[in-house]
Image: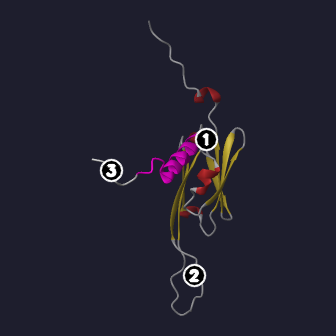
């Protein structure tokens, strides 16, 4: 039987998602990756040659509100924030402050999590993740037995 509903052989939304995935795979710091930031957490990632520097603005949080984890894949930042209790006495015109949590993973290829360090001061988190040495990135050559 002939299908009476025409199909679009080039579905634009599927094509766009596939292209985004391809760019994310080959270029982890592309502008497409930046546009996918849905957490509201603003970060800068700097390649300093031998290490990556990740700087994140987290105003209003303390060090105990943050969870920073580093793996071979990258840095994961987690945090929770809360506002004061709701004040029923005032008639707010605008109320934008909120409470909640965030999680954001920044991919860092060829990173060495064992030598990473972090510091937090005045609402700015800085994480330094050294890159793997060249011989470790290429792996270890195995001797073949006859």
Q: Label 2 crowding class (10 Å Cα cut-off): few <14, some 14-19, many 20+?
A: few
State the mark number for residue 3: 3
Q: Do the residues labelled 2 and 3 touch (CB within 8 Å)?
A: no
Tell me residue 97's x, y (percent): 57, 76
The residue singled out by tag 2 in the image is 95
State the mark number for residue 115: 1
Work out whether mark 2 precedes mark 3 in sequence or the reverse, and give the earlier one: 3
Q: Label 1 crowding class (10 Å Cα cut-off): few <14, some 14-19, many 20+?
A: few
Does the magenta segment cover residue 14?
A: yes
Work out whether mark 1 precedes mark 3 in sequence or the reverse, and give the earlier one: 3
Does the magenta segment cover residue 4?
A: no
Q: Nearer the viewer, mark 1 or mark 3?
A: 3
State the mark number for residue 99: none
Residue found at x 53% / y 88%: 87
Tell me residue 116's x, y (percent): 61, 44
Residue found at x 51% / y 84%: 86
Magenta stretch in the rendered image: 7-26
CA gap between label 2 and label 3 equals 53 Å
- Quadrant position of the C terminus in the picture: top left
- The residue tagged with tag 2: helix, strand or loop? loop
- The residue tagged with tag 1: helix, strand or loop? helix
> Dividing the picture into quarters, in which one does residue 93 lie?
bottom right
Badge count: 3
Answer with left or right where residue 75 lies relative to residue 7: right
């Amino acid at each position: 039987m002939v299908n009476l509903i025409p199909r679009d052989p080039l579905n634009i939304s599927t094509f766009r998602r596939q292209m985004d995935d391809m760019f994310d795979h080959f270029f982890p710091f592309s502008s497409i990756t930046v546009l996918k930031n849905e957490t509201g957490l603003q970060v800068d990632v700097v390649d300093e040659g031998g290490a990556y520097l990740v700087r994140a603005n987290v105003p209003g949080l303390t060090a105990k509100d943050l969870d920073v984890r580093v793996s071979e894949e990258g840095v994961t930042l987690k945090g929770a924030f809360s506002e004061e209790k709701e004040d029923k006495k005032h008639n707010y015109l605008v109320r934008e402050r909120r409470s909640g949590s965030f999680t954001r993973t920044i991919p860092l290829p060829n990173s060495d999590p064992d030598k990473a360090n972090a510091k937090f001061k005045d609402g700015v988190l800085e994480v330094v993740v050294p890159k793997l040495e060249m011989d470790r990135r290429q792996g270890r050559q195995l001797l073949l037995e006859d």
